[in-house]
Image: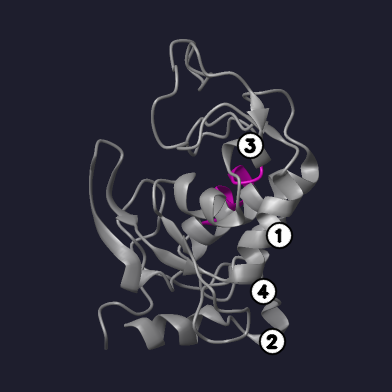
Amino acid sequence: EDPLLNVCMDAKHHKSQPGPEGQLYQQCSPWKDNACCTANTSSEAHKDQSYLYNFNWNHCGVMPPQCKRHFIQDTCLYECSPNLGPWIEQADSSWRRERILNVPLCREDCEQWWEDCRDALTCKENWHQGWNWATGKNRCPWGSPCRPFRQVFPRPKDLCEKIWSGSFRFSPERRGSGRCIQMWFDPARGNPNVAVAKYFA
């Protein structure tokens, strides 16, 4: 049994090991046959200011739904996927012992995320740090104006690689290649990320 395969990271809400969940909510449902998230986590992944991270997507006005769905999908992948083992690293942070680094995200997933968010607004390129939390939710730090994503992240690669401080890297590989992780997949055809984790392990 390879220790990098079929594992859950040691972070804030993950189960200690993956297994089936009867029902996962909406966008997290593709992972229900083998998941690192609970049903409760999967439903919280869809909420603004959810108890998961108390993170405010609407820090520069309301995030458009076609953009927000990518952030929900990103949260589902992070919370539910048992196929990120090859990219788990130690994290020295108060809220999690492990994080993911340089997960090769399929080109189309990254490009579509950028395309659907290009006109949404944000004030920061790294969403992991540097917010003003004085009110209990993340607000833009002083001196950081709200600008369209396409200015903050000029290329899809910038968005995918910078927004979560290197959690993802932009892969030139395409969906279905078996060489990159898909944020979106059709569970009826199985989870394509199982083979990808195996390839990189």
Picture coordinates of residue 192 (x, y %)? 57, 82
Q: Characterize the local packing of mark 1: few (<14), some (14-19) or many (20 or more) Cα atoms within 10 angstroms.
A: some
Q: For residue 112, which numbered disc appears in the image?
A: 1
Left or right of 65 in this view: 107: left
> How far is the residue under mark 1 from the one under mark 2?
21 Å
Q: Could you tell me which residue is drawn at 56 percent across and 67 percent down?
A: 21
Mark 1 and mark 4: span between their CA atoms? 14 Å
Mark 1 or mark 4, whichever is nearer to me: 1
- Gap in angstroms between the C-alphas marked 4 and 2: 8 Å
Mark 3 vs 1, N-terminal side: 1
| The N terminus lies in quadrant | bottom left
- Residue placed at 54% from the left, 57% from the top? 157
Image point (63%, 36%), residue name = 151
- Disc on the earlier residue, 1 or 4: 1
Residue 49: give x, y in percent of width and height. Answer: 59, 30
Q: Separation of disc 3 and disc 1 at Cα?
A: 16 Å
Can residue 23 be seen here? The reply is no
Q: Give the residue pinned by disc 4.
A: 185
Amino acid on which the number 2 mark rests in the picture: Arg
**Magenta residues?**
38-46
